[in-house]
Image (spheres, rainbow, N blue to C red):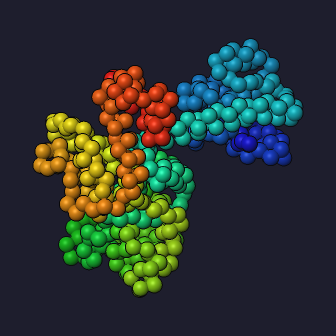
Amino acid sequence: MLNAVIVVDDEASIRTAVEQWLSLSGFEVQLFSRADDCLAQLPRDFPGVILSDVRMPGLSGLELLAEVQRRDADLPVILLTGHGDVPMAVEAMRDGAYDFLEKPFSPEALLSSLRRALDKRGLVLENRRLHQQADHRAKLESSLLGVSRGLQNLRRQVLDLATLPVNVLIRGETGSGKELVARCLHDFGPRAKKPFVALNCAAIPEQLFEAELFGHESGAFTGAQGKRIGKLEFANGGTLFLDEIESMPLAQQVKLLRVLQEQKLERLGSNQSIKVDLRIIAATKPDLLDEARAGRFREDLAYRLNVAQLRLPPLRERREDIPLLFEHFAQNAAERLGRSFAPLSGPQLGHLLSHDWPGNVRELANVAERRVLGLGEPEPEGIEAGQSLAAQQEAFEAHCLKAALTRHKGDIKAVLAELQLPRRTLNEKMQRHGLARERFLKDE
């Protein structure tokens, strides 16, 4: 239940009395003597109610109401009025005020109005949260493609972790999409509007690592011309993605650990501490604790980074996603290159499904692009068995359904006629394979 109340009144005695009443009743109270100060500190989606006097120096309560309505029409504003302001307050309620209380008012009347307003605010915010979740879920499904159980679980985990202020360690093979998952964790969380900074720890020479991470002042070392902001500082307020974290030099691991513990850093050549607020998402192929036991990684840093862990399944463990991913990459390549491509034949799809995909999604994207360019059939080198007949049949069925829906632009009657299926059977199969008719409609 919400319990936050902002009180805006230029009379100190009123503010003090209201604060005492509300605090004793379990409310969290924030006081302002001027409306413009309140507006300057009013957060988006404020989880509470504003209680404001009408007549004040500077912005009046009515002007405060108008600005609050412009920012968030569903944020309840209760006006405090003198006897002569009652007609004005009634008019303000027509303009969006939640309620008004005529001075002097009793604590019981105030509490009753506040509780009703907070109940309403709670329903509004819960409705917004559910709509945002649905929106994020839809966007995430278009970013992390796949109908396999592994991908469905991964998307749920990403949505859960995106909103939490914890560091995340991503485990996955080369080409499995670790940076894409890190980007989703950033984009669907509260830091989305702040920087997302990616750094591949294996791509930086050891002698340049500290300057890259922490930045430097002019003249800090030979060749340091001018001040440079490091990746940690540049990511302030947002997210720093450290790929192949196992490659970070041990000396820099100690300094990174200190930054995570103290939330501040020093540039090379400077004694001034700079506060930073950032989230670390790290990615690794090996187990960091195994690396620590082998003396190649600091155990304390491993625990600090591994507050939550995500495992990305390799493509060979989610073969039912291969047709969807292949068509996605081929379609993107065709649009980028101004080419067209034909749907896969049964044997071609069989080749894709039987391949072991050591390069994972990155390798599949390369094969799809080569197909669009006409540089070869989608038959990767090293094709080998390893997929059950049932799994191959499932993947092939999903491919056939999607191809028919694409050809007929979502016309269900035409698809039923072509595939010679009962309507109920088609509906069940589309639901099982995550195929929504809306994705194939002509105008889309």
Residue 344 visible somewhere in the drawing: yes
Residue 282 horizontal/vertical position (percent): 42, 65
Q: How many marks?
A: 0
Residue 374 falls in image quadrant: top left
> Can you say which quadrant of the picture contains the C terminus?
top left
Residue at 17% across, 43% down = 372
Q: Is residue 142 left or right of residue 20?
A: left
Residue 174 horizontal/vertical position (percent): 32, 64
Q: Is residue 292 left or right of residue 93?
A: left
Q: Is residue 334 left or right of residue 70?
A: left
Placement of 193 over or under 228, stated as above or below: above
Residue 425 horizontal/vertical position (percent): 48, 32
Q: Nearer the viewer, residue 145 or 252?
A: 145
Residue at 54% across, 41% down = 133
Residue 91 falls in image quadrant: top right
Residue 192 horizontal/vertical position (percent): 44, 47
Residue at 19% across, 38% down = 341
